Image (spheres, grey):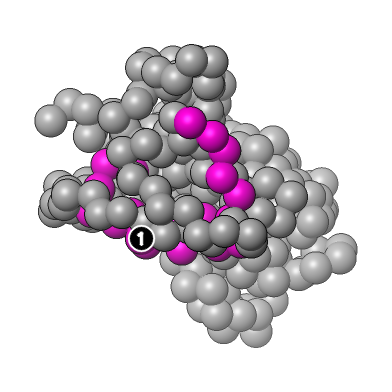
Amino acid sequence: MKNLHVMIAEDEQLAREELVYLLDKEPDVITCPSAETGEQLIDLYVKHEPDIIFLDVQMPGISGVEAAKRIADLAYIQKPLFIFTTAFDTYAMDAFEVEAVDYLLKPYDESRFRKTMRRIRKLMTQMDGTVQQDMEEKEPSPGEKLLIDDGERMVVLSPDSIYYAVPSKRVLEIHTKGEVIESKMTLNELENKLKGGSFFRTHRSYLVNLDYIREITPWFNGTSNVTLTDQDHTSLPVSRAARKVLLEIFKR
C-alpha cells in the first residue's frame, strides 16, 4: 500500500505532540506540516494535499467542521479522509456532517488510535480502486466543435486545438495553438463540454489535453509537473492525487 500523507489541525500543543508521536510509530505515514487554526489548515491543505486530516472540532477562527466543508469543496478527484478529535463526545455528531470516517477522544487511547488507522487503510484501498475503475470505464469519444463566448464574439473551436485551460482573473483562459481565448464559463463547465475526450484535470485549476503532454517530471511532496509540446514547452502542475491517475492512463 502507498504511503499515507497525514496532516494535523490542533491548536493545543500537547494534544498535537501526542498525535504526532502516535503517527510517527506508523511505518507508512508521512506527516505534513500541522495547522493551529481552521484558516491555516485550508492554506496548508492547498499546498500539501494530504490524504488524511486529523482535526480538532473546536479551533480559533473557523471551526474544524467548517474548515472540513471548505476543503471538501476544494478537493478534486479524491477528497481527504477526515478524523475529528475532541475532548467531548457530544461533538461526535458534528463529525458526520462532513462524512468523517471516525473521531477520537482526547486524551488519545493508543488501541483506539490503531483501530482508526486500520479503518483508514481499508478505506484508502477501496478509494484507490474506485478511482482507477472510473478512469478505466471512461471511453473517449470523437471531439465535436465547441462554441465559446468570449464576451465580444462566439468562437468556434476544435477541442484538438486546445493545449490547456486555466482560470485567471475571473475569466477562463483557453490556450490553443493559435491564441488564448478568454471565456466567462468555469473550468468545470468546459470540462463537462469536453467529457469523454482526451482532457484531464492535472490539478483543480488546470485542464490539460493529454495528447500534448511531452513529459512528466517529479516535483515535491509527491506532486509532479507536466511539460507540453507547445512552442513554449509550458510546464503545468500535477497534484499528488492526479499524478497517480495520470500515470495509470499512460501505462495502458
Q: Is residue 130 magenta?
A: no
Residue at 51 percent across and 55 percent down: it is 187
Q: Quadrant of the N terminus?
A: top left
Residue at 17 percent across and 26 percent down: it is 251
Q: What residue is shown with label 1?
A: 193
Q: Is residue 179 magenta?
A: yes
x, y percentage for residue 245?
30, 38
Furthest residue toward front: 153
Q: Is residue 229 left or right of residue 16?
A: left
x, y percentage for residue 39?
79, 56
Q: Is residue 38 visible?
A: yes
x, y percentage for residue 65?
66, 71
Residue at 50 percent across and 60 percent down: it is 154
Q: Quadrant of the C terminus?
A: top left
Front-most of residues 227 and 145: 145
x, y percentage for residue 159?
33, 45
SS state under label 1: helix
Compared with 27, 89 (above or below) is below
Q: Which residues are magenta?
A: 178-199
